[in-house]
Amino acid sequence: MLLTAEPADTGKRLDHFLQQRLPAFSRSRLQEWVKAGRVLVNGAAAKASFTLRGGERIEVEPAAPPPLRAEPEDLPLDVLYEDADVIAVNKPAGMVVHAGAGRHEGTLVNALLHRYGGLSESGGPLRPGIVHRLDRETSGVLLVARNDVAHRHLAAQFASRQVKKIYWALVEGSMRGEAGRIERPVVRHPEHRHRMTSRLETGRAALTEWRVLRRWENFTFLEVRIGTGRTHQIRVHLSDNRHPVAGDRVYGAKSPPRGGRFFLHAARITFDLPGGGPLTVEAPLPGELEEWLAAL
């Protein structure tokens, strides 16, 4: 596919130019092609932010479209609990929960499909069984629905805030007091679109409660309970409270990541089983986080 930048395109970013010239493809797919080196400007790979001067020869080699359904993949899976309706897994840091943003392999969903074959279809063909999510670099317990009835049952509990989710977080600095709550709406950052913010008056309601488990000179170890499940909620609430999660450079942490991750772990979840009765599932602190604490 060959395109030519016209004089009127002078000053445009490469990715914006591609969006205008190739409206049949989504912005994310075009950006994936740029990152993969499938877009050449005058014969050379360029970044999405490359500024056109007009007259450039732009070659685009489209990639095959992503799969319409998640596929099974033989990957390690740490199962904490399972019955005919629900699976609770211990997700490692670094693993994406489901396909998206150019990632279609190596996800938790791929591993689940290999182990169990079929899951709830309520979440769609790329997210079978997924009722809630954890960030890629957050480890810990995550629930999966094995059938649509269980999916609706669990989703209703999450929607009505009946599910109790407890996290462990190491944050920078010394928290003032021994416990507290942060209740501020969370919305996507207007300038940095990969981040969220709670410093604006708009957004979705979000509640984060915390209590101190242990203190060091420059760090505080917290137990965190969230009453809502907004994107990056714990990370953004603690960062905007001037105590970013240790290693979370996206939200202003000065301490470097360890083992490619920040210090946030989903330690415990309590919910009602579809068949009746409450259940609490716990995920132990991973070895790399134990070592992080021991090094303080």
Image (cartoon, helix red, strand yellow):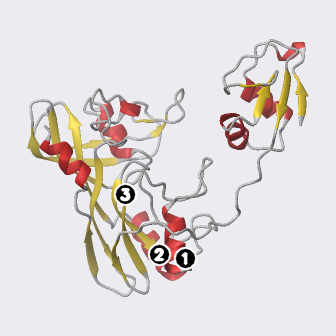
Coordinates of residue 118 in the picture (x, y in percent): 56, 80
In this view, 275 is above or below 45: below
**In the image, what residue occupies the spot 33% across and 86% down?**
276
Marks 1 & 3, CB-CB < 8 Å contact: no
Question: Amino acid type of disc 2?
Answer: Ala
Question: Amino acid type of disc 3?
Answer: Pro
**Gap between marks 1 and 2 measured at Cα:** 6 Å
Marks 1 & 2, CB-CB < 8 Å contact: yes
**Residue highlighted by disc 2:** 145
Name the element at disc 1: loop
Which mark is on residue 196?
none
**Residue highlighted by disc 3:** 92
**Gap between marks 1 and 3 measured at Cα:** 22 Å
**In the image, what residue occupies the spot 44% across and 83% down?**
85
Q: Name which of mark 1 and mark 2 comes first in the sequence.
A: 1
Q: Residues within 10 Å of mark 1 (few under 14, many from 20)?
A: many
> Which of 266/184 is in front?
266
- Which quarter of the rendering shows the C terminus? top left
**Residue highlighted by disc 1:** 120
**In the image, what residue occupies the spot 37% across and 52% down?**
93
- Quadrant in which residue 161 is drawn: bottom left
Is residue 285 rendered to the left or right of residue 39? left
Question: Amino acid type of disc 1?
Answer: Ser
Name the element at disc 2: strand
Mark 1 or 3: in front is 3
In this view, 143 is above or below 165: below
Marks 3 & 2, CB-CB < 8 Å contact: no
